[in-house]
Amino acid sequence: MSTNFYLNTGIIPLTNIQVVKGGLGELVYLDNGFSIDTHIGKRLASGAYCWACRKTLCVDGEKAIHRGKATWSNKCPDCGALFSDRRDANHAVSYSCSFSWTISPLALHMIVAPAGLNANCIIDDYNRKMTIQEFFQILLECPIQFSNFSSKSKVI
């Protein structure tokens, strides 16, 4: 299961914010009449993960977790913990999610800051609205994160 997250443009006052395009695949956010793409990123199931060692059980590494032919281990390569479908003090290896950013976290903070911490400034595919704090709480379940924006981006 995957979930896309977007800016809730009905809440966010887009003034004095510009994220300038710095490379291929980066999104442009402007408040001066240009179109605004509101996609923040996508959460995906990413298979077994050792939460104690902070390591995927994908033998081919993090970059391969979403490839159909990835090879998986049934235990952590570092501590040897076995997979369990629940995560608690006795079961370190369990399911996890990844998150692929389409906007930098810094740009996201700058865009939503004028709305305030308690504003429901983010919305997902299922029309669930959330604050920036609630969104970052969701990201705690996404230990593997990918950046789909340019490292050359500039926030003005």
Image (cartoon, rainbow, N blue to C red):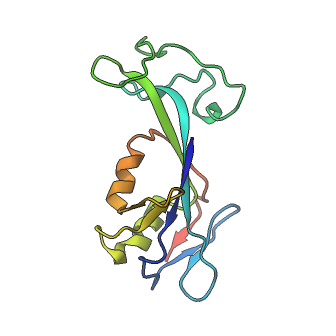
Which of the 4 quarters of the picture holds residue 122?
bottom left
Q: Nearer the viewer, residue 131 or 111?
A: 131
Q: Residue at x 60, y 58 (%)?
A: 149
Q: Residue at x 65, y 32 (%)?
A: 64
| Vertical arrangement, residue 103 with respect to residue 99, above or below | below
Q: Is residue 139 above or below residue 35?
A: above
Is residue 139 left or right of 56 when viewed as pictured?
left
Image position of 78 with respect to 87: above or below = above
Q: Position of residue 100 (x, y in %)?
A: 56, 49
Q: Position of residue 92 (x, y in %)?
A: 36, 21
Q: Nearer the viewer, residue 46 or 76?
A: 46
Q: Position of residue 3 (x, y in %)?
A: 54, 50
> In terms of image quadrants, where is residue 129?
bottom left
Quadrant housing the N terminus: top right
How many marks the image carries: the answer is: 0
Q: Quadrant of residue 111?
A: bottom left
Q: Residue at x 35, y 63 (%)?
A: 131
Q: Position of residue 140 (x, y in %)?
A: 38, 43
Q: Residue furthest bottom?
A: 32
The residue at the point 44 percent across, 59 percent down is: 128
